[in-house]
Structure formats: structure tokens, C-alpha cells
Amino acid sequence: MFQRLALIGIGLIGSSIALRARKEGLAEHIAVQSRRAETVATARHLGLGDSYTTDPAEAVEGADLVILCVPVGAVGALTEAIAPHLAPGATVSDVGSVKSAVVAEMAPRLPENVHFVPSHPIAGTEHSGPEAGFAELFEGRWCVLTPPPGTDAQAVEKLSEFWRRLGSSVEVMEPHHHDMVLAITSHVPHLIAYNIVGTAAHLAEVTESEVMKFAAGGFRDFTRIAASDPVMWRDIFLNNREAVLEMLGRFNEDLTALQRAIRWGDGETLFNLFTRTRSIRRGIIEAGQETADPDFGRHKKS
Ligand code: NAP
């Protein structure tokens, strides 16, 4: 599909793209870039690309597809660094978990003769770095594209096809809409996990052994999410502030209602909500976005 794919950043997402693109033969040449020489060395050791560099300008030279796979807070400076070196007609994309802020950072810095098609694969794990990647990461997952109005339709279609070949289903959305949807489905849940694990860590000063010993009582599942990359998630909250605050406001109102129900012994309210939420989980399983295995398949023999 592409002559030269340049991956700027080669962590979990960049390396997973590299592995799957190689497997599917989506690019003749994969140019791998990372900021630190150690990461580049690891990527080389894993054989993720055809050429390796710490210099973003060198990586994008002659590339017809460039994808920034770095924390959201780093896209502005990197766009600045690559802009003068982009080939005319190239498609430039990213994988950031926030879209309005990324568009605002990247669009004004890009030359007019490239196609800008931001993307967000809704797929990930709590692990980071090039060793964390795997070719199946995007299989059966959604990838949202948020091209600015007026973007060349052929470029959007070609990038959509690229993501489909990586295993994803593709949906096109407005950046603001994307940010609201992701605030409630991903960003606020992560904030809740970070918060509850943080609260427990404070309590652990008194009850350390109990927190670890009885972790299976629900807490453990939060710790998986709360183990997600601190830089990536710091940048998400700093760059999706409005949508996260809006959704947190609603969350707090609903939490207050639950608090009241508990205080007044209103079992019906609790039961009705818990019944509704159980059916939501069934819906997610039916949509193929989760396994029905008990305990998230943790005890499955493989
Ligand atoms: P990662 O595994 O931590 O890898 C980050 C990459 O970015 C590394 O190559 C790192 O380089 C580079 N980098 C970090 N800070 C940088 C900076 N200030 N300037 C230049 N390069 C920098 O990250 P990831 O999980 O692949 O996430 C990358 C992007 O994908 C993020 O925008 C995130 O929002 C998005 N995303 C993540 C997930 C997920 O679950 N992880 C899911 C969907 C989308 P060095 O190692 O050389 O320092």
C-alpha cells in the first residue's frame, strides 16, 4: 500500500503497527524512529523495521505515510521537526488518545501539500515500549479517524484501508465528539482507577498486608488500569481537560445519588442500577469487545 512507512515513536502502538504492517506487507520499507538510542536499539534487536534512527527528520524523508506514535504532549514539537522534511503528497497521521488538542497542535505546523488524517486505535494494554507490541493488538478493535474538513477523500480512504488491514474496523468522527466519547469510555475510568488505587495506597500505610492479601475483591482489576503509562495518561488529562471535567461532573452527580441511596437504605435504586449495568456488560461481550470468561479469562489454561 505504501512505499515507505515512517513510525515516529516505537512504543506499544508503534511496534504493534510495525509488526502487523510487516506481516500484511503494507509497506516496502518501514523506517523506525525513537527519541532515545536505547529504544532504537531494542527496536532494531526485535527487527521491527528496515531502517532505524533517533532523528525524526531522517525517518520521514521520502515517506508516503508518517505516523506519530508518541505521547500526546510530544506531537507539536515533533510535527515542527518533521514538517520541512515531509514528501509532497505524504499522508501524516498519529495515534493519540485525544483528538481536538492533537489537531490544534499538528494542523497549523504541517505544510499544505500533505494529507493530515489523525487516527486513534481504540486498543491497548497497560504495557509500554517496543517489547510490549504484538501484531494482533488491533484485531477486532475500532480505529477512529478525525480528518479535518476538506481533507482529500482518497487519502482518508487509503488510511482507512491501512487500518482495516491492521485488523481494525474504522469510523470517521469529529475530534470533539471523539473526545467526549473517549472521556466517558476510557479517560474517566482510568482516573477512577488511579484515584482508588491512590486512596488504597494511603490506607495501606495502616493496613498494607490486607490491601494486597484481599486484592481479588475487585481492587485488583483497578490496579491493572492504574498501572498504565504515567506520561501517556498525564498528557491525556492535560489535553482532554474540558471533556473529562464535563464527564466527571456527571459522574459525581450520579455518585452522590448512589451515596444517598446507601444512606437511606434505598435498595431498589441500587438493585435497578446494578441490573442495568450487568446488561451493559453483556452487550459489550455480544459486540465482541470483551471475553465472557469468568475473571477476565485469568485462569484459562493456554
Ligand atoms: P509508549 O509505549 O510509552 O512509547 C512512546 C514512544 O514515544 C517511544 O518511542 C518514546 O521514545 C517516544 N516518546 C516519549 N516521549 C517523547 C517525547 N517527549 N518526544 C519524543 N518522543 C517521545 O507509548 P504508546 O503506548 O505506544 O502510546 C503512544 C501513543 O498512542 C500515545 O499518544 C497514546 O495516547 C496513544 N495510544 C495508546 C494506547 C495504549 O493503550 N497504550 C492506546 C491507544 C492509543 P523513547 O522510548 O525513545 O523515549
Image: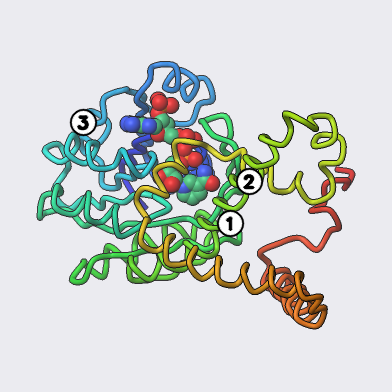
Q: Quadrant of the C terminus?
A: top right
Q: Quadrant of residue 159?
A: bottom left
Position of residue 259 measured from the top left corner of the image (x, y, whole percent): 69, 68
Q: Quadrant of residue 172?
A: bottom left
Badge 3: residue crowd in 10 Å (few <14, some 14–19, many ≥20): some
Between the residue at mark 1 and the residue at mark 3, the CA separation in whole angstroms equals 37 Å
Q: Answer with the quadrant where ligand 1 appears in the image.
A: top left
Q: Secondary structure at mark 2?
A: helix
> Which residue is under mark 2?
225
Between the residue at mark 2 and the residue at mark 3, the CA separation in whole angstroms equals 34 Å
Mark positioned earlier in the residue sequence (1 or 3) = 3
> Which residue is under mark 1?
189
Work out whether residue 58 or residue 82 is closer to the camera in this orientation and state it: 82
Is residue 264 at all visible to an observer of this figure? Answer: yes
In the picture shown, does residue 114 fall above or below 35? below
In the displayed structure image, the side of residue 70 where residue 149 appears, left or right = left
Q: Secondary structure at mark 1?
A: helix
> Which residue is under mark 3?
57
The amino acid type of the residue labelled 2 equals: Ile
Labels 2 and 3 touching (C-beta < 8 A):
no
Q: Tell me what residue is drawn at x 54 percent, y 25 percent.
A: 46
In the picture shown, does residue 274 fall above or below 200? below
Q: Tell me what residue is drawn at x 27 percent, y 31 percent.
A: 59
In the picture shown, does residue 85 fall above or below 20? above
Labels 2 and 1 touching (C-beta < 8 A):
yes
In the picture shown, does residue 47 fall above or below 294? above
